[in-house]
Amino acid sequence: MSFKDFQLHPRINAGIDACAYTEPTPIQKEAIPPILAGRDIIGLAQTGTGKTAAFVLPLLQRLLNGPRKKIRALIVAPTRELAEQIHDNIEKMAQKTALKSVVLYGGVGKQPQISRIRSGVEIVVACPGRLLDLFNEKVINLSAVEVLILDEADHMFDKGFLPDIRRIIRQLPRDRQSLVFSATMPKEIRHLAEEVLQNPVTVQINHTLPAPTISHALFQVAKEQKTSLLKNIIKEREMTSTLVFTRTKHRAKSLALHLQKAGYSAASLQGNLSQQKRQQALDGFRDGTFKILVATDIAARGIDVLGISHVINYDVPDTAETYTHRTGRTGRATRSGQALSFASQEDSRMISLIEHNLGKKMLREVPPASACERKEDICEEKSTTFSHQVPQRRRAVPSHQSPQKRSVADSGTRKRSGSIARTLSSVKRRDPA
Ligand code: AMP
């Protein structure tokens, strides 16, 4: 199958050419035809599979006809980085269509966003908080929305956004096309999808399995030797572009500083940074100014940087799903990548869960003796700091085990369709975490 088979408008095909996509990815092959046919979709796919183009291309095809300078499509995303990425993708793919999009998120001034909305846009890409702010301030009118897209719905749930999402949905016309994308399907997302979607088509792309282009290796190492090991393998393996994950913001910051002081080209990406600093770190990593980006899960979720050669789990993640998300930052589209994890004794249970999810054992690598000689305990925070630095929701609760208090009270307004419930309940979770 080629992109030509979708019979998209030549102006949209020009956008595909501008992105240098030659062949649709599996999710594009499966999702684009039903979306073009106007169907609702539940897409079980993680970032890295090409899902953005899977919804953007048919969206542009629909918007080419019909009124301009009215908000006709709303895309909601859980993080600023993901919202920016979707917006960038739209700008690239829509460059010959004269369709306009705006991206809305908090932590930056409202005025430029308001000016852009007032100049007339057809597509809004937004994080829930800022969108509701602008809606409540009557800056934004959602009464003409024809298409709603919820991206990374499971992550919205992790971040406690579902009540906001339901508030947003209540402002939209009932007669619309809705698409929900999620890497996993915890019951809260299943309920949300039942409320939002009508007779949806389910599209599922290996949703909790890491990409086959990634190799997985494990170093069993004492905590205090991780930093020395990291520096050693960065040097030895001539890593071109390496994303390092730590569990906390404090650790990300102090590890990046330590690497900088030791002469490495490194930056951190973590929630304590201003939006401007985050963007600088991300842009610098993307353009090669920084070879190493040390990040937390929340900050790095959904980031799309092509050509990441290595993902290093300096700290083993809390769930097998998070492992999939982290390692999915390398090996994107069809490229290959390596995932290396540093595990100490206490991580053995999580390593078993990850390996169960991978369906294979990770390759055991022996840390070089020189890496084990030095104890560089620079990144251990004091326990008092630790407790308030931890991103609370993600640490405490695996994404699919919601505490009572997070279950959402404001249930949706639409009738549940029996067929939707059946379609969704047939989607089995694979993640053992
Ligand atoms: P996404 O899952 O949307 O974040 O996409 C992951 C990466 O794959 C992005 O860098 C896209 O630009 C890229 N991509 C999307 N579709 C294709 C395609 N058909 N061929 C090659 N790369 C693609």
Image: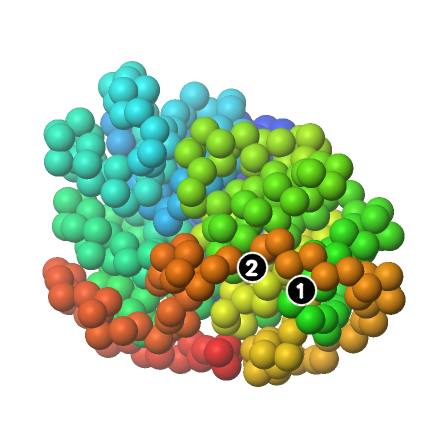
CB within 8 Å, label 2 to label 1: yes
Q: Horizontally, is 216 left or right of 163 in the view?
A: right
Lower position in the chain sequence, tag 2 or tag 1 = 1
| Residue under the image location 13 percent in, 30 percent down | 137
Q: Label 2's element?
A: loop
Please name whichever residue, 193 or 221, is drawn nearer the observer in this view of the structure. Answer: 221
Q: Where is residue 329 shown, x and y percent of the image?
A: 61, 52
Q: Label 1's element?
A: helix
Give the amino acid type for the residue marked by disc 1 in the picture.
Glu
Q: Which mark is residue 355?
A: none
Q: Which mark is residue 380?
A: 2
Residue 115's quadrant in the figure? top left
Picture layout, residue 177 above or below residue 88:
below
Give the amino acid type for the residue marked by disc 2 in the picture.
Glu
- Bin the neighbour count of mark 1 within 10 Å (Cα to Cα): few under 14, some 14-19, many 20 and up: some
Residue identifier under label 1? 224
| Residue under the image location 13 percent in, 62 percent down | 410
| Residue under the image location 50 percent in, 69 percent down | 318
Total residue callouts: 2
Please name whichever residue, 74 or 163, is drawn nearer the observer in this view of the structure. Answer: 163
Q: Is residue 122 visible?
A: yes
